[in-house]
Image (spheres, helix red, strand yellow):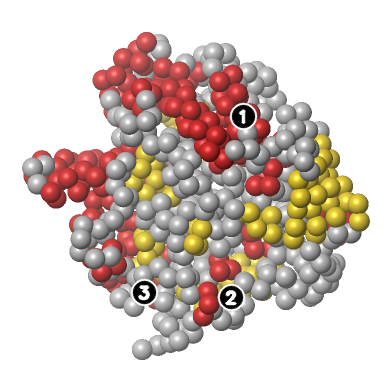
Amino acid sequence: MNGNYWDRVLDRRFSRRRALAATSAGALGAAFLAACGGGDDDGGDDGGGTPEEASGLLAKREDTSKQAKSGGTLIMTNPADPPHFDPHLLTLPAAAATSLIFNKLLQVKPGVLEISDGSMQPDLAESWELSPDKLTLTMKIRQDAGTPPTQAPVNGRKLDAQDVVFSWKRFSATGTARQDLVNSVNPAAPVLSLDATDNRTVVIKLKEPVSSILASFSSQLQGQFFIMPREAETIDARRQPVGGGAYYLSEYVPSSRIVYQRNPGSYDKSAYPEKIETPIITESAQVIAQLVAGNIYTHYVPVPPDSVVQLKKDAAAISLYQTDINNVGVSIFFGFKTGDKAPFKDVRLRQAFSMALDRDLYLDTWANVSRFKADGLDVQTAWNSAASPSAYKGWYLDPQGKDFGENAKFYVRNIAEAKKLMAAAGYTGQTLDSNEAAGTNYGLAYAPQIETVHGMAAEAGFKFNRLQFQAPAPWNAEYRDSRGFMDGIAFRLTPVPSEPGDGLYALYNKNGSLNYGFDAEGKGVASKEGPFLGDPTADDFTQKLRSEFDNNKRIAIAKDLQKHLGKMQYFHHALGSATGFNVAWPAVRNFSVFNGLQWGYLWKNYWIDETQAPLKKT
């Protein structure tokens, strides 16, 4: 293992300790502790004006939609070549393409300068109605959702209810997340049938009332239910994606660029850029160099935190923005195969692993907390539980807060207690497999963040053999989608359904599409197909989340579930969250204004102001 990243993390630990020792008696020490702890920081300033005024570095986040002008070219980046463009098969590098090219039935309304409250808004379905018994959902399909007029074989045809039926059948047969919706695939899934009664009307029959059913049809991550024209049956959708979304794929040059052109047939008139270009850049240094030069206008994901302020200093005309609080880093899951190579079946070893992790140090390193503070930039941080603070308002329960209860101790770094739990579980230092995807499919920070986790775990005595696998094969089937039928641990970025209740069900119900085969009694997983013994308590909570329609009661159930999962430690939904900072040239307006799952979905809300740098040269 290359020690460079872990050495940097250790340096941060020592620097932080020295700072705390020097300032513990003063107000500066209190502010520093609040930033590193994250649980009680309200993100406000200290009386010196707004954060923008206090730092002198930040640009103001401002909704300028009323002044927006259509046209121009938005130049972003993509971190890797997409293995394919099929919207029903999950692969992160094509997530932006999916969001731009294809419609969903519904959308979650983004928050404006705040976290979304989960309100629904139309997409291909312009209206909907749930029957009094909540077992029939009827949707009216809009008549103005046109496909690109220049793309065969659709040639501008308007989408209709028959396309929805075609897409449902295709998704039911191949979709990565089909078991969350399709009852014929998973008897616990809610949708019994989806049919068209005419070209404008879709009727969906449900097995039982499901409070999150509208959100279930709105997730914009690949592998979910996107609408494809029925002509897709005759083309290779992996290479030739055609939809009715705001944009269409006009050019793809492997290892070079992906280009999208605005779809003139789309109903969506709030898609402002005429063209979106995404050069494929796999190295952070090259991303930064191209940003400083003005050759790209912003980055697909935020610029590495330890580089963003220096980038602003190197390119004074570029704008630095604070982002909403979001997950920092990789998610961690465990193998639960039967046999001696699955020691994480024992809850004590999972608890020990969690207690070996220094969440504050991880956030300080990968969210750059203390160095941002030194530059006068405020950062709000939080430890993630089974949920994160970026979920809908009110759903997250803070493991550092007074309401979490006794299981909060399993999130606190405690090497001595971790070693006791390891000994009680019978772990004596044998080398375990640590599995990860090769390349940059999960972004440029994925590999070094894994190294950081390894270094922390090693301090408690864990030993790992680091293995890398190519994506999509064999990584997807053997590890990402293994359902826990693997050895050791593995790392991924977790796709989050658009509704937090659905997300908790997908991860922690034994029938969920993201469930990793865990079970409360530690008996392991017999095969990739099951049996998945699950956790009866988690199953009960997640089923109640689906059947309860009162939002306040659903939130209470979700918080009880988070307390329970704090003890079981089945899955690490990243280690924490933080507000961050990203750059965009002033020509990109509405940047960092709209909050929601990113992955390209919100790019269409940016607009290009050609009077601003780097388009207007000074």
Distance in Å between CA atoms under marks 2 and 1: 43 Å
- Category of crowding for the residue at label 2, using alpha-carbon neighbours closer than 10 angstroms: few (below 14), some (14–19), many (at least 20): many
- Asked whether the beta carbons under mark 2 and mark 1 sit within 8 Å of each other, the answer is no
Q: Provide the residue designation for mark 3.
A: 318
| Element type where label 2 sits in the image | loop
180 relative to 560 in the view: left or right? right
Instruction: Give the quadrant of the N terminus.
Output: top left
Q: Provide the residue designation for mark 1.
A: 544
Q: Residue at x 59, y 19 (%)?
A: 536
Type of the residue with mark 1: Lys
Q: Residue furthest front?
A: 132
Percent across and percent down for residue 601 are: 59, 60
Percent across and percent down for residue 323 are: 40, 59
Q: Provide the residue designation for mark 2.
A: 273
Q: Quadrant of residue 304?
A: bottom left
Q: Residue at x 56, y 24 (%)?
A: 538
Residue 278 visible somewhere in the drawing:
no
117 relative to 7 in the view: left or right? right
Front position in the image: 522 or 257? 522
